[in-house]
Amino acid sequence: MRITKVEALEKIANRIRMDIITEIYYGKSGHPGGSLSIADILAVLYFNEMNINPNMPDDKARDRLVLSKGHASAAIYAALAEKGYIPKSDLLTFRNINSNLQGHPDMNKVPGIDMTTGSLGQGLSVANGMALASKMDSMGYRVYCILGDGELDEGQVWEACMTSVKYSLDNLCVIVDCNGLQLTGSTYDIKGINSENIEQKFRSFGFNTITINGNDVFSIMNALGVAETVKGKPTAIIAKTIKGKGVSFMEGKEKWHGKAPNDEEYKLAIDELLAKEKQIDKEMEGE
């Protein structure tokens, strides 16, 4: 069943954020900033957009998601747990040496992971293959690929863009998590990348492009709906997000790219997210 109510999806995104923080706290390592920034995107994909069934994770007709920025694994594990692919208790084992929930997602170990990722720049090439296979086999499934804006430093991304357009992969939707920060600074300072020229680049390769607020559930829903109607070319959604979104002391801070919260920071983050959930609940009750 697809969830269409904005507030319900916002609540799911908030739960995903709480689980991200919990995973990284218990794992004592991870990437909170770029995981928190895509929580809203994952909530919409898993609970509103994608044709998937946690009881049939290997269904050949299912839609696919390639998380090319695999270091944001805490986010996809949280979404999978919320959807029912894996027990929530597994999240407490994140990055444990004996856990299936590795620092980068492994399709052979975790149900619902469509591609093993982590080496940046490779995800779109794989997504191209999936989308092309869907067309060749007349399966009709759609493929979604989440790229980081810092990941666009990799030349393979742009080679893959040429393939996406050459084969008219209109069943492919690229989502760029455009939070403006990467490991050592801003994407603009490092490679001159910002949301405006990212859109220009994708458009110049032949993509249909849409720029949105990537932390706004309604905007994400609308953009994905538009992407489904586009024929003859792939779509790239440039999702302008805030790194660390949802935890005020992490928002827009590059130091939270790959840093686990300590005890005090964990409590502050969870308390803030719990307060947000109460606020959403009140809004839902008031309708």
Image: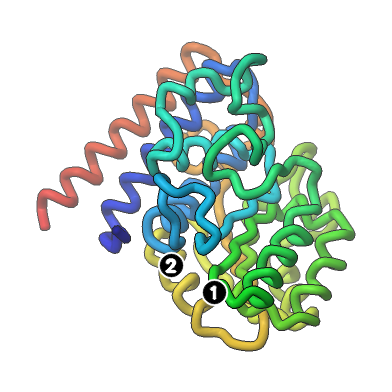
Give the residue type at disc 1.
Gly
From the image, tell me which residue sits under label 2.
219
Label 1's element?
loop
Which residue is depicted at the point 33% across and 53% down?
A: 9
Q: Residue furthest bottom?
A: 232
Residue drawn 56% across and 72% down? 139
> In the picture, which quadrant includes the N terminus?
bottom left
Q: Nearer the viewer, residue 251 or 149?
A: 149
**Residue 12 location in percent, x, y?**
35, 45
In this image, 10 relative to 172: left or right? left
| Residue for point 76% across, 38% down | 183
Above-or-below relation of 105 to 61: above
What SS does tag 2 mark? helix
231 or 15, nearer to the observer: 231
Q: Residue furthest top?
A: 263
**Which quadrant is the C terminus positioned in?**
bottom left
Mark number for residue 140?
A: 1
Closer to the camera, 281 or 275? 281
Q: Residues within 10 Å of mark 2 (few under 14, many from 20)?
A: some
Whether tag 2 and tag 1 are in contact, CB under 8 A, the answer is no
Residue furthest to the left: 286
- Residue 247: image location, x then y, percent: 46, 35
Q: Is residue 200 left or right of residue 85?
A: right
Name the mark nearer the viewer: 2 or 1.
1
Lower position in the chain sequence, tag 2 or tag 1: 1
Q: Is residue 209 above or below residue 12?
A: below
- Residue 70 vs residue 205: left or right? left
